[in-house]
Amino acid sequence: MHFFVGSFELYLRNSYFLVSKSLSRAFLCMSQKSTTFAADFDKTSIKTIDIMKKIMIIAAAALSLAACTKKEVKLPEMTVGQMTAYELDGFRLHVYNTNDVMGDASYIVEGKDGLVVMEYPLFKENAAEFAEYIAALQKPVVTDVTDYHLGGSDKLPLTMPEGMPAFIEGPVYSGMMSGFAQAFGETMVDLPTQKAAEVPFDETQEWAGVTFRFEHGAASDFPGASIIIGNQVYYTHWTPAEAHVSPLQVGSAAAVEAELAEAKEALASGCKYYIGGHGGLAEKKQVEFKIAYLETVQRLLAENADAESFLAALNAAYPELPGDAAALANALYAAK
């Protein structure tokens, strides 16, 4: 594009020179009152000038459009987390991996004329550079979708799945947040206090020119939503990964079944990317792995009477898989 714009600029300069030269000839011929030269000018040069003027009008409009592409938004350098942008059909997805102790991820969906923020960071150092990045995009924030994770979004319009505001105020979620406050203290942001708009399940919203379809999340999880963004990105609580599943995600046989059903729903969506409140971005391959892994876990639970034999069988099935298989085994059998 830079080459294109530079070539156009050179073209316009040359065109301007040619037209100026022709106009100079016109004025010269009139001042000299040369009838022969004027006749020649009338037949050729004036026609050439008319053509060149039309070309210049078209070229100037094209150059103006192309020049807009030269305006590059200077984005701040991330020093705490990492931000990666992905181009999709009709919007851009910005994925922010916080690198915090919980492996949280936050997102910005950039439409043509606005932004949708998802899962604003919980810790001050992350929230500060996240806010700086949002400001650098130079577009208004339409809403902040808080699905599973509260964060530092007190100054933004807030949206949640239907029923989530009441759940956040209940004993389970508020107790969890109180525990975080005791553990992390002043490193945490002030939690939002504004009233959130609620989106019913099985409904689609459109923000910044992008659709957001709210579906029910895993039955074993918080009452949050799995959100299909622009029919290309599937958001849920945990990003699928080629690793042992966290016992926080599947702490019982019922949870394994619920997460398996959710993973199959995700795969059936046909989305290109899969994102979550923990783990960043994945693709179809990771969703397929998660399905096969959870099916294996189900089978091994049925075949093994205790955590020790289950763990041995799981490690044999996935000998080099990262993650804490022992913690998963202990959680699953403690729940029996």
Image (cartoon, helix red, strand yellow):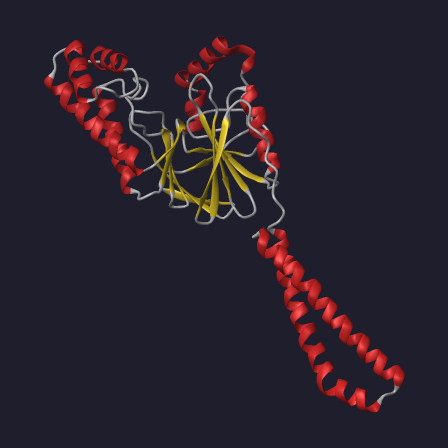
Q: From the viewer's perspective, is residue 200 above or below residue 79?
A: below
- The residue shown at (58%, 54%) is 3
Residue 301 shown left or right of residue 133 in the figure: left
Whole-percent x, y for residue 56 in the image:
68, 68
Image quarter of the C terminus: top left
- The residue shown at (46%, 16%) is 177
Toward the viewer: 193 or 221? Answer: 221
Instruction: Say how many tags the image has.
Output: 0
Residue 280 shown left or right of residue 310 in the figure: right
Q: From the viewer's perspective, is residue 250 above or below residue 69?
A: above
Q: Quadrant of residue 218?
A: top left
Toward the viewer: 267 or 88? Answer: 88
| Residue 190 seen | no
View extreme (left): residue: 303
Q: Quadrant of residue 32?
A: bottom right
Q: From the viewer's perspective, is residue 259 above or below residue 204?
A: above
Q: Quadrant of residue 191?
A: top right
Residue 205 shown left or right of residue 12 in the figure: left
Residue 114 shown left or right of residue 11 in the figure: left
Whole-percent x, y for residue 62 in the image:
62, 62
Whole-percent x, y for residue 244 in the image:
27, 21
Q: From the viewer's perspective, is residue 57 above or below residue 174?
A: below
| Residue 308 seen | yes
Toward the viewer: 311 or 179? Answer: 311
- The residue shown at (61%, 38%) is 74
Whole-percent x, y for residue 331 in the image:
25, 13
